[in-house]
Image (cartoon, rainbow, N blue to C red):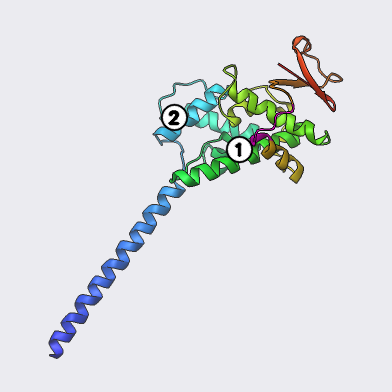
Amino acid sequence: MKLKIKKNMKEVLIITTLFIIFISYNIFIRNEEVEALSRYGSSGSEVTQIQTKLKRWGYYNGAIDGVYGSRTLSAVKYFQRKNGLTADGIAGTATLKAMGINSSSSSSSRSTSSNSSNVSLLARLVYGEARGEPYTGQVAVAAVVLNRVKSSKFPNTIAGVIYQSGAFTAVSDGQINLSPNSTARKAAQDALNGWDPTYGAIYYFNPNTATNKWIWSRPVTITIGKHRFCK
């Protein structure tokens, strides 16, 4: 009887140990998947997205082949330097967020993360471009970004529009990296919810500082604060 009990206990111990190993392995694998980063030597769809966006914004001039080679590495570092990120060449969480790329594994969390990321990025653009302007004018700046996303003339993502080379002064001078206040966040959310005080404008400018003669030729839809909004 004692031998049988000992044998049963030994079997239970073996099964318990195997179960713990199995659970630990799965947790490790899942964590590895969540924390996976695109870096030199990586390949796949995420790398393709990175190359596509950086090429569209003028940071990358190589082939869009889904392979994280030396050109992609240099382009990512260039993007990071220009946008106040650590220029390590690794497309980590902060870099992917700045590019508007979500690497979350579930569709629901991707949707939530995407929305949160869009609000945050749009708020930073509003704060950098229009803080001090009337609230309606801040919503209007966000609306211009969203109108560009809808237009075939511009990139089709919020990050793509904002980071398009030379598109916004706040990106060029680094103010895009300032922390937005609650007003800018609310303005960004209101624009995302559908409020467009510009009546479909895709450009805006300050007539007191504008030096581009072309922008003066655009039909004005409305003037809010210091900005003229036009198509």
166 or 100: nearer the viewer: 100
Residue at 39% of width from left, 34% of height from top?
A: 43
Mark 1 surroundings within 10 Å by alpha-carbon count, few (fewer than 14), some (14 through 19), many (20 or more): many
The residue mark sitting in front, 2 or 1, is 1
Mark 1 highlights which residue? 118
Q: Main secondary structure of the magenta part?
A: loop
Q: Position of residue 94 (x, y in %)?
A: 57, 42
Q: N-terminal of the two: label 2 or label 1? A: 2
Q: Is residue 41 left or right of residue 3?
A: right
Q: Secondary structure at mark 2?
A: helix
Is residue 194 within the magenta segment? yes
Image quadrant where residue 119 sits: top right
Is residue 185 within the magenta segment? no
* Picture disc at residue 48: 2
Residue at 78% of width from left, 33% of height from top?
A: 136
Residue found at the very far right of the displayed protein: 208
151 or 50: nearer the viewer: 151
23 or 190: nearer the viewer: 190
Q: Is residue 122 left or right of residue 8?
A: right
Of the 4 image quadrants, the one containing the C terminus is top right
78 or 224: nearer the viewer: 224
Residue stretch rendered in magenta on the structure: 191-197
Q: Secondary structure at mark 1?
A: helix
> Does 224 sit above or below residue 221?
below
Is residue 77 something that shows in the picture?
yes
